[in-house]
Amino acid sequence: METRQRTDPRETFGRALRGHRQEARLTQQELAAKAGLGVRTLSDLERGAAGPRPATAALLCAALGLGAPDAEGFHALALASWHAARR
């Protein structure tokens, strides 16, 4: 019988965050500075080791300059990640 692993929402958010950061051609240090976050916090989020607080997601969204459709998806992933981190 095949078992299917569930993907942790924190990892999904982390991959999305890394993709948006790379698309914006920013280093972790640059994005952290633009968002007013620590580099370690950003690293933890990208690795899926933490889930972002809603305010942190908003800061990242603004720093990345995400437009409406991307921002909505980003916030949905962030919320799922935040809830997973609190369990």
Image (cartoon, helix red, strand yellow):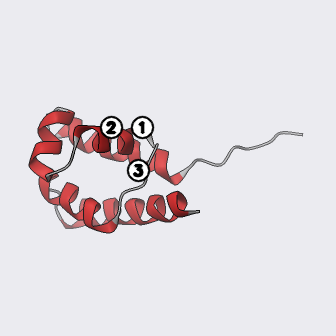
Name the residue type under label 1: Arg
Q: Check residue 13 in the rendering and tell me which mark sits there, or answer none.
A: 3
Name the residue type under label 3: Phe
Which secondary structure, mark 3?
A: helix
Q: Is residue 9 left or right of residue 78?
A: right
Q: Residue at x 43, y 49 (%)?
A: 50
Instruction: Measure how far apart labels 3 and 1 are at the Cα level.
Output: 9 Å
Q: Residue at x 42, y 55 (%)?
A: 51
C-beta proximity under 8 Å, tags 3 and 2: no
Q: Position of residue 1 (x, y in %)?
A: 90, 40
Instruction: Measure how far apart labels 2 and 1 are at the Cα level.
Output: 6 Å
Which secondary structure, mark 1?
A: helix
Q: Which residue is mark 1?
A: 47
Q: Position of residue 10 (x, y in %)?
A: 47, 50
Q: Which residue is mark 2?
A: 43
Q: Is residue 8 visible?
A: yes
Q: Earlier in the sequence, mark 3 or mark 1?
A: 3
Q: Quadrant of residue 32?
A: top left
Q: Position of residue 87 (x, y in %)?
A: 59, 62
Q: Is residue 68 left or right of residue 76?
A: left
C-beta proximity under 8 Å, tags 2 and 1: yes
Which secondary structure, mark 2?
A: helix
Around disc 3, counting alpha carbons within 10 Å, would you say few (fewer than 14), some (14 to 19), or many (20 or more)? many
Name the residue type under label 2: Ser
Instruction: Measure how far apart labels 3 and 2 are at the Cα level.
Output: 12 Å
Q: Quadrant of residue 69?
A: bottom left
Around disc 2, counting alpha carbons within 10 Å, would you say few (fewer than 14), some (14 to 19), or many (20 or more)? some
Depth check: give the residue in front, 22 or 36. 36
Around disc 1, counting alpha carbons within 10 Å, would you say few (fewer than 14), some (14 to 19), or many (20 or more)? some
